Image (tube, coloured by chain):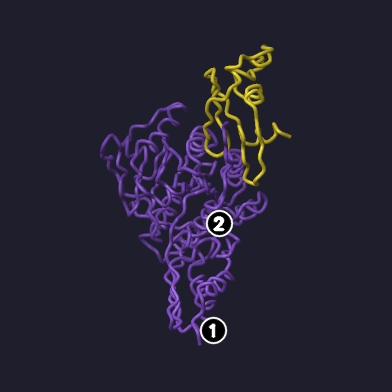
Amino acid sequence: MEITWEDGTRTAYTGKQLRWACPCAECRGEGGSPGRLSRVKTLSDEELRVKDVTLIGQYALQIAFESGHATGLYSFSMLRRLMQ
Amino acid sequence: MDAPTTHQVLEALATIRDPDLGRDVVSLGMIKELDVSSEGRVSFTFELTTPACPVRDRFKSQAEDAVGQLAGVTGVDVRMSANVRPAFMRPKPSEILPRVKQTIAVASGKGGVGKSTVAVNLAAALRLSGASVGLLDADIYGPSVPVMTGSLTTPQQSNGHLLPIEAHGMKLMSFGHLNPGSEPTIYRGPMVGKAIEAMMIQVDWGRLDYLVIDLPPGTGDASLTLAQAVPLTGVAIVCTPQDVATDIAMKALQMFRRLNVTPLGLIENMSWYVCPSCGHRHEIFSHGGAESAAKRFGVPFLGAIPLEETIREDADSGTPVVISRPESAGAKAFVEIASQVAARTSIQSYRQLPVINVH
């Protein structure tokens, strides 16, 4: 996935980078309990392939993976930080 | 003397800069249908980005002067027109509200500061300028738009869509139209989101230049749903001058910033009161709080509205004050603010959102 920002700069992301950065409660954990991404060591290829991207308002992207996982809302500020 | 070339005319017009967009009016595409006759008569259409443009008259005289000074010109005929452009440069329209060009939210954070009164009059003032305008009342628990616009009817259905209520030349939809009477709406958060989404998706809004959205107080469900469902052009924040209102308005402002929704600016309501018996100006809720807060947070200050009994009376009787008493100080303040909002909104038409490509 590639993003061209308002200022013209471009950043590219692999499905693997995005999947491991998923900010959703299931992956990150909530209320002190650890999330799935801290429990597993590997993810299947299906989990790492981006299937669809939907714009949420103008602040985030909802990224759906081939596995069906699509609960993460990746804010633009987070996506920019990911590449710095 | 030979008539000037169209190139020379455009060069002369390119000296005019749009103060809000910060570029010359030729490269912004505002000059259309330019014609230069062999006798030296120049005629063209000056297409503004909003009919509520605050510098409309200035542009017209600047254009006449710039072209009139060229050698060989015997007359200048400027046709002023307006065409509201869609928010953001993007390849395809949003799936929700595809035929609505600009969505403007009115929020406050705090309740009771006159947000709905401002939203109704802002919408009515944009309508008076000649734009096509809708008003969506997103306050599910305390819908005020039906009373304030005198539209206490229920919507008709057509082809599975709800038709908006028409009043004062505007298209309206409120939960007060869908659930009229004194029965309260008792909803948990997720239901509020669904109700607001339904008023966008299931209502046939048609083509609109502006959809003004009156938000409920708070920084939760309603605002989040809205900011997630549609790319809002921007949000106008209403507050009264005292600290308790500006502090909470700033929380609303910061929330919208996090959601990447542009703050169009701050509006100070109930700014002053002129006593009808003594004529003295009282500043009941203090004065200037919004302007200094706007400076502190780096957003435009859009204007101040007086506290007038007539604004309240006209809201209760269902005709926005900008329509019923256009000469009143309150109405004039609303019209000036609407034109500032329209100008700030136009800037967003030239903004490019991030473009996403998936390989």
Q: Is residue B258 above or below residue B133?
A: above
Of residue B258 and residue B139, the one placed in the foreground of this image is B258
Residue B299, x across and y down, in percent: 62, 52
Circle 2 residue: B302
Q: Residues within 10 Å of mark 2 (few under 14, many from 20)?
A: many
Q: Residues within 10 Å of mark 1 (few under 14, many from 20)?
A: few
Q: Could you tell me how far apart the alpha carbons at marks 1 and 2 are, in whole angstroms?
A: 41 Å
The chain letter under disc 1 is B
Of residue B328 and residue B170, the one placed in the foreground of this image is B170
Residue B352, x across and y down, in percent: 57, 47
In the picture, the quarter occupied by the C terminus of chain B is top right
Q: Is residue B43 above or below residue B340?
A: below
Q: What is the secondary structure assignment of the residue under circle 2?
A: strand
Residue B43, x across and y down, in percent: 43, 74
Of residue B85 and residue A59, the one placed in the foreground of this image is B85
- Residue B252 found in image quarter: top right
Q: Amino acid at mark 1?
A: Ala
The chain letter under disc 2 is B
Residue that lies at the very extreme toward the right in this rendered image: A84
Q: Counting residues from the N terminus, which is met first, the one under dot 1 or under dot 2? A: 1
Instruction: Answer with left or right where residue B66 lies relative to residue B171.
Output: right
Q: Amino acid at mark 2?
A: Leu
Q: What is the secondary structure assignment of the residue under circle 1?
A: loop
Of residue B49 and residue B135, the one placed in the foreground of this image is B49
> Which residue appears at 41% of the width and 35% of the height?
B140
Circle 1 residue: B71
> Which residue appears at 44% of the width and 73% of the height?
B35
Chain B hue? Answer: purple
Label total for image:
2
Residue B248, x across and y down, in percent: 59, 42
